[in-house]
Amino acid sequence: DKVYAAKGFFLILALVVMALTFKPWGMIAEIAALAFALAGNTIFPAFLLGIWWDRANASGVIAGMLSGVLITFLPFVIGDTFPMVSRLLPATSSAFIGAPVVICIMVVVSLLTTAPSESIRRFLARDVHDCTED
């Protein structure tokens, strides 16, 4: 079920964050910049498409957010082996490239999977965007 997958993902993310606290990172500004990059690669695209595109669905958002986490932490994982990754996706500003890539992933996965129900689409049009059908 998607709810259990999302809960599992956040549990894994919490464990990763706990493990990262044992490594001294550096200045608080660097940590804050990394947090904003992570948010820009995960939460921003999900909110953007979730509110403004009625075809966005849970599968697309989950795939996009997982991709966003990967894009954010890729320089730490393979940056020493492939220095070009660290240059293209600097840890503190990876959202400049990462957010558009994540949006594309969300769109593709959403289009390849089942659309949200008509009631969800009506809710977005009526209650979120205040568009009434004539």
Image (cartoon, rainbow, N blue to C red):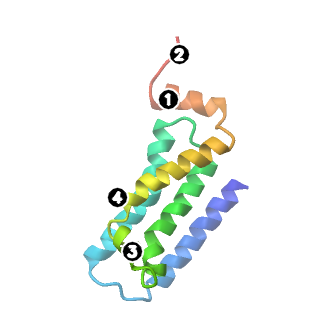
Q: What kind of residue is marked 3? A: Met
Q: Of circles 4 and 2, which is in front? A: 4
Q: Which residue is mark 4?
A: 96
Residue 50 percent location from the top left of the image: 51, 43
Residue 123 occupies quadrant: top right
Q: Earlier in the sequence, mark 3 or mark 2?
A: 3
Q: What kind of residue is marked 2? A: Glu
Q: Which mark is residue 84?
A: 3
Q: Which residue is mark 2?
A: 133
* Distance Cα–Cα, label 4 vs label 2: 37 Å
Above or below 108: residue 133 = above
Residue at (47%, 58%) from the top-left corner? 42
Above or below 61: residue 111 = above
Q: Earlier in the sequence, mark 1 or mark 3?
A: 3
Q: Earlier in the sequence, mark 4 or mark 2?
A: 4
Q: Of circles 1 and 3, which is in front? A: 3
